Amino acid sequence: MDPVIIVGAGPVGLALSLALAAQGVPSVVLDETSGKEEPRPARSVVLRADMAALVERLGCATVRDEGLRWVGWRGTRGRRPTRQVAFGLGLGGTEEWSEDPAEPAVPAAPLHIPQHALARGLRDAVAREPLVRLVTDARLDTVEQDRTGVTAHTRGPAGTWWRGSHLVGCDGARSTVRKLLGVRFPGRTAVERHAVAALRTELPWPGESLLHRQPPWRGVGEEVTARPLPDGVWRIDWLLPPRGDLVTPDALVTRIRETLAGWCEGTTPPYELLDTGVHTLHHRLARRWRVDRVLLAGEAAHLLGAVGTQGLDEGLRDVDNLSWKLGLVWHRAAPDALLDSYQSERRRAVAARLRAADQALPVLRGGGGLRTYLPGVTRAHDALLADGHLGRGPLGASPAHPHSPLAAPFTEGMIPVGTPLGAPVEDVRVTAPDDTTVRLRDRLGQARFLVLLVAPGTGVWERRHWRTAGLMPRLEEAAEALPVASEVLVTDAYPGAPAHAVLLVRPDGHLVAAFAGVRPEELHAAADAARGSAPAEDGAEDSGGDSDGDEGRAGSRTEGKDKRGEKTRKREKKERGQEREQGDARGAEEGRRGPGAGPERPVPAEVPAPAEAVVGHDRTADVH
């Protein structure tokens, strides 16, 4: 079968190629640059703990070697501290929850890393992966689709035609793929502007990030952010007026000196200026993220970044959502309609994020008015802005998909747990089939669903004593009969879950359903729905509809209904009935592989040659 063509070799495109390779899917990455990039310390990214773990699972060594996990975050208004948060330096969970009630819960630390270091680490991982072929100096100029695949033509020294099963445009804000598809990209320009400097110095709060609103020093501006990097380097951002003058080098040096002096008791400490720049943030949302066999991801599909939101973090969430779905479709273990849910889920989530930011901007940046003097208003504004920086609330929390077309049908055996349906599961400790104790997050991203049993006390027993006792034999039999590949894991406890609860988790870590005990038929139906086999309800909305004019209001409109024909629906219904009737017989024939493993993975007719290890050039954030 033909490989997947990925256009764009920035962090999103490289991460997608590695995520597909982890599922045995070959890809060709077309990079329009020479593959070399000048280091820019002032161009850095903040990744939430779950996305940092994703990048590390993909083999990016620079996440640990050249990134920094913050030990804390503090907010200040004027001269008065307003809030301080301590972070856990482990990968932690997506919420503040501790497995040990005697220990206080702390949120997981975000990761701060220069973007060129992240891209270089991903390129090094690509160079070690035989299923990924990286082609430099390959500029896309034509895309053609037919019923069996996609053909793309590139210009350059090695200009040629490329054939793939699907094509994913990860080519940034000025996406050629999006333009060739004729997909509109409405939104707003210059939502925020920031002057940025990367410098090496000592500040009074090593390892902590700072958001300082209304600093009491002349000429600094209304808001300053300081984020630490390794080796004593800090990235400092100054919010600029919407239509202010150009920032000259002299004016920027003045800002640096006054800001450092204000933070260090009136004396400017020694500093080494490494890099400077001005970042302009835009908010845009592509109307469509899928056109038949061509899809969009990263900044080709969305631009955001104001009031603390993180654009690249959202691009990696696109990768996490799309890769397992594209992997199942490529291996013919799921219907093509599964790819529709990528647009539905991710576009809806980004539209909600943009809507929240759009609503917050007038409140946070408007200033003045009687509302400023009302009791509690200032604290509420500070808390709203802090959410974006801390990865909480509508501006920053990990997205959930409660209205996904992949939602499991309701059954009597379903129970509520601490994680809402469609939300990311907690990163609890689990016992794996090889008797090792790992984090749940370590088992994600392999194109297999996770079946998690909550069994108190098993953490202190040897697995050989309980793997054949109690619910385990029946649970493993039920997991083998699923219509998708799966893995059974066991945990001592899960927030809000009673003993013997069974959780079904998607490959990207989102909760499909939770059941009271082992219920094979209900578990099968939930897994079948989560792989896209269950027809969507008539009138189901897409991921957020139009984004015309104001991308914030775009999240509530309907872009289309499920377009699968009646024949497809009847055929899939018949196939599901046959699978349920023949499940036991297939399980006996297939043994441990189970009917849920799908067809054997086809060996690509021509395995791509490994790419050379070269320094990366990021093209995913040409426009900020």
Image (cartoon, rainbow, N blue to C red):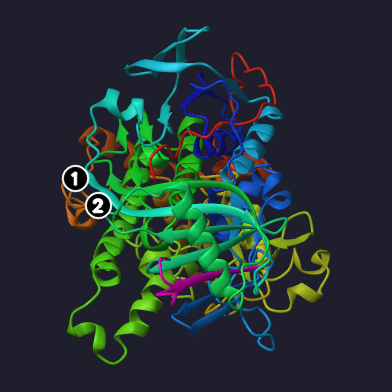
Who's the residue at 52% across and 49% down the image? 482
**The quarter of the displayed image where residue 108 is located:** bottom right
State yes or no: residue 218 in magenta: yes
**Relative depth, front residue between 366 and 488:** 366
Q: Label 2 crowding class (10 Å Cα cut-off): few <14, some 14-19, many 20+? A: many
**Relative depth, front residue between 11 and 525:** 11
The label on residue 544 is: 2
Magenta segment: 207-219
Answer with mark 2 or mark 1, whichever residue precedes in sequence: 2
Who's the residue at 39% across and 44% down the image? 576
Does the image show residue 362? yes
Where in the figure is residue 441, as x and y percent of width and height? 62, 58
- Three-letter code, disc 2: Gly
Where in the figure is residue 112, as x and y percent of width and height? 60, 56
Asked if residue 285 is positioned above or below residue 392 in the image, the reply reads above
Q: Which residue is mark 1?
A: 559
State yes or no: residue 202 in magenta: no
Q: What kind of element bears circle 1?
A: loop
Q: Which quadrant holds the C terminus?
A: top left
Q: What kind of element bears circle 2?
A: loop
**Relative depth, front residue between 282 and 91:** 282
Q: CA distance from mark 2 to mark 1?
A: 7 Å
- Three-letter code, disc 1: Glu
